[in-house]
Image (spheres, rainbow, N blue to C red):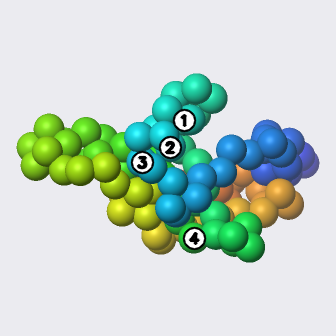
Amino acid sequence: MSKNVLVREFMVTQVVTLSPDMDICSAMRLLLHHHISGAPVVDAEHRVVGILSEKDCLRVFANEAYFQEAVARVSDYMSRKVVTVGPEDELFHVAGLLLEHTF
């Protein structure tokens, strides 16, 4: 019988979070500083309202280069559809979610 591998065995507990009102360039610098590919966006009550990923940051670069847009906020670029898992979920379940969705 194989052991069920759980999310808690691999997850980090000190999570870098972003605010929806944060300047997008500051948020991208924070991701680079921490060497992470994305971070949850949380409201004042620490509820997850979105996620800012590398893909979202690429849109910032593309829009800036093409449209020469002014400074924007995290909420302008974050993905609002967020799928979460809990520490007791099995990694096979997480792998299924990654295959099912296009993150």
Q: Which residue is mark 2?
A: 27
- The residue sitting at 37% across, 50% down in the picture is 56
Alpha carbon separation for disc pair 3 and 2: 5 Å
Q: Does residue 99 appear in the picture of this structure? A: no
Tell me if label 2 and label 1 are in contact, CB under 8 Å: yes
| Res 57 quadrant in image | top left
Q: Which residue is mark 3?
A: 24
Q: Which type of secondary structure does the marked residue at label 2 adopt?
A: helix
Q: Which quarter of the image is occupied by the C terminus?
A: bottom left
Q: Which type of secondary structure does the marked residue at label 3 adopt?
A: helix
Q: Which residue is mark 1?
A: 31
Answer with left or right where residue 65 lies relative to residue 56: left
Q: Which residue is mark 4?
A: 49
Alpha carbon separation for disc pair 4 and 3: 16 Å
Closer to the N terminus: mark 1 or mark 4? 1
Q: Looking at this view, is 41 or 68 the one in front? A: 68
x and y percentages locating residue 36 in the rendered image: 58, 33
Q: Which residue type does callout 3 highlight?
A: Ile
Closer to the N terminus: mark 3 or mark 1? 3
Q: Nearer the viewer, mark 3 or mark 1?
A: 3
Answer with left or right where residue 20 lies relative to residue 42: left
Q: Residue most toward the front?
A: 70
Tell me if label 3 and label 2 are in contact, CB under 8 Å: yes
Mark 2 nearby-residue class (10 Å; few <14, some 14–19, many ≥20): many
Q: Which type of secondary structure does the marked residue at label 1 adopt?
A: helix
Q: Nearer the viewer, mark 2 or mark 4?
A: 2
Circle on res. 71 = none
